[in-house]
Image (spheres, helix red, strand yellow):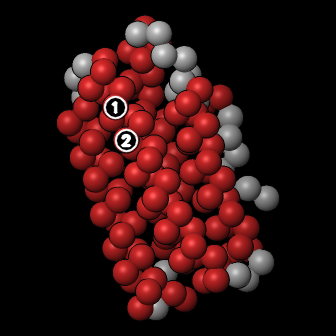
Amino acid sequence: MALITWNDNLSVNVQEIDLQHKKLVGMLNDLHEAMMQGKGSEAMGKIINGMIEYAGIHFQTEEKYFVKFGYLEAGSHKREHTDFVNKVNKFKQEFDKDSFTLTFNVLQFLSDWLKNHIMVVDKKYSRLFNEKGLR
């Protein structure tokens, strides 16, 4: 069973960004599934590395549109992106030292952060992006 099930509440009404969010949700669900099968530690390194890499791509996409459309909350939004990357990098460093104690903490953080970030922070730019013709 998925930890996060994609639904319209998670949509920012921009296809490109929604597809990226779905991929991040899928990676988180993969980690959850691995944990349920007792393989969380085996999957953790790969998934953390993948999330760091893919989140970077996703954040660049959003930030490109912030500049293009003059999004007024770009500064605070970019700080959230930076904080996320720093936190996940810290998880990775901890995982590299002791993979068994980290899995549930990472899963909880990623799940909470992703849902909150999409449903609260990302939703703030949705209307502007749509008004500028991005769908």
Percent coordinates x, y for residue 63 in the rendering: 33, 35
Q: Residues within 10 Å of mark 2 (few under 14, many from 20)?
A: some
**Depth check, front residue: 15 or 79:** 15
Numbered label attached to residue 60? 2
The residue drawn where x is 34% and y is 73% is 90
In the figure, is residue 107 to the left or right of 81? right
**Depth check, front residue: 115 or 94:** 94
Tell me the amino acid under the disc marked 2. Answer: Gln
**Depth check, front residue: 66 or 30:** 66
Quadrant placement of the N terminus? bottom right
Whether label 2 touches label 1, CB < 8 Å = yes
- Taking 67 as reference, is 113 above or below it? below
| Circle 1 residue | 64
- Taking 115 as reference, is 120 above or below it? above
Numbered label attached to residue 29? none
Q: Residues within 10 Å of mark 1 (few under 14, many from 20)?
A: few
Mark pair 2, 1: CA separation: 6 Å
Q: Under tag 2, what secondary structure?
A: helix
Percent coordinates x, y for residue 10 in the rendering: 58, 35
Asked whether residue 58 is in view, the answer is yes
The residue drawn where x is 62% and y is 43% is 22
Asked whether residue 120 is in view, the answer is no
The residue drawn where x is 49% and y is 49% is 114
In the figure, is residue 26 to the left or right of 132? right
Q: Under tag 1, what secondary structure?
A: helix
- Taking 106 as reference, is 99 above or below it? below
Percent coordinates x, y for residue 57 in the rendering: 44, 47
Tell me the amino acid under the disc marked 1. Answer: Lys
